[in-house]
Image: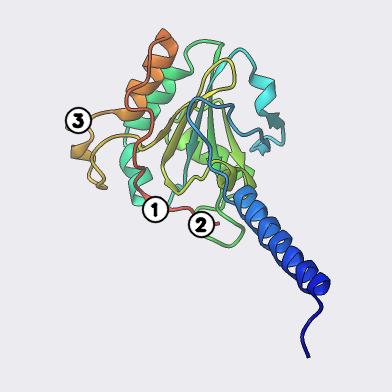
């Protein structure tokens, strides 16, 4: 028995709508941050229990640094390089550095607020704040993949750089001096009001433990 034309058409339309809906949902789930576009908003709590939102930093240049203290690539840069960058890029009141921990509870790199503060002190680190993203919502909104993974957001809330801290993807401290400092170059360009080039690079490090 043949399906009446009207029923067949309705079924076809239903399938088209379902596919379109799934495509739209997928696009929303996998939407990636874009350089030159507004940075994804976020709400996070720091190691002191204080809440921060991106909009709180309007008029300021913001660095986001994804971190995991047990990652060898993070250890490499916390041999002094990361601290020097933090010192340089938090020297003025209109510059903010957030170290972001997206490690889920029970996974490598997840720490308490007290432990985060202890690490900051013992390593002589100088971020504006260490913030927690235990659910991974912020990391996934930024498509953060590794520790470290670096982002620069300008004073207008526009994403200007995302990618690696430098050009040599090893865990060797001696390679820092040989590498092209992608992130530092990008941050200095943003502060100087000049174009960032390259604005997107490939990050390297340990996978984020979502």
Q: State whether residue 159 is above or below residue 22.
A: above
Residue nearer the viewer, 53 or 10: 10
Say which quarter of the image contains residue 197.
top left
User: In which quadrant is the C terminus drawn?
Assistant: bottom right
Q: Which residue is drawn at 50% across and 10% down?
A: 92
**Percent x, y for residue 19?**
66, 62
Give the left or right position of residue 49, taking residue 125 as reference. Answer: right
Question: Which residue is under mark 2?
Answer: 209
Q: Distance between the residues labelled 1 and 3?
A: 21 Å
Give the left or right position of residue 21, taking residue 32 as reference. Answer: right
Q: Residue at x 63, y 56 (%)?
A: 23
The secondary structure type at the circle numbered 1 is strand
Question: Which residue is under mark 1?
Answer: 206
**Percent x, y for residue 106?**
58, 62
Residue furthest to the bottom: 1
**Percent x, y for residue 94?**
56, 12
Name the disc covering residue 177, or none.
3
Say which quarter of the image contains residue 123.
top left
The secondary structure type at the circle numbered 2 is loop
Residue nearer the viewer, 167 or 46: 167
Query: Mark 2 and 1 residues: CB-CB less than 8 Å, in contact?
Result: yes
């Amino acid at each position: 028995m043949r399906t009446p034309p009207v029923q067949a058409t309705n079924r076809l339309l239903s399938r088209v709508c379902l596919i379109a809906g799934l495509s739209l949902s997928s696009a929303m789930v996998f939407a990636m941050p874009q350089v030159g576009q507004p940075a994804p908003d976020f709400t996070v709590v720091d190691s002191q229990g204080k809440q921060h939102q991106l909009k709180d930093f309007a008029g300021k240049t913001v660095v986001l640094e994804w971190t995991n203290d047990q990652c060898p690539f993070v250890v490499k840069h916390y041999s002094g390089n990361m601290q020097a960058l933090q010192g340089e890029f938090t020297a003025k009141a209109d510059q903010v550095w957030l170290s972001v921990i997206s490690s889920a509870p029970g996974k490598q790199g997840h720490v308490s607020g007290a432990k985060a503060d202890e690490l900051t002190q013992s390593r002589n680190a100088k971020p504006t704040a260490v913030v927690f993203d235990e659910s991974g919502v912020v990391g996934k909104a930024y498509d953060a993949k590794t520790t470290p993974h670096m982002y620069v957001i300008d004073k207008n809330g526009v994403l200007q750089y995302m990618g690696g801290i430098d050009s040599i993807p090893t865990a060797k401290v001696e390679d820092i001096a040989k590498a092209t400092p992608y992130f530092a170059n990008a941050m200095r360009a943003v502060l100087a009001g000049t174009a960032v080039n390259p604005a997107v690079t490939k990050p390297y490090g340990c996978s984020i433990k979502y």
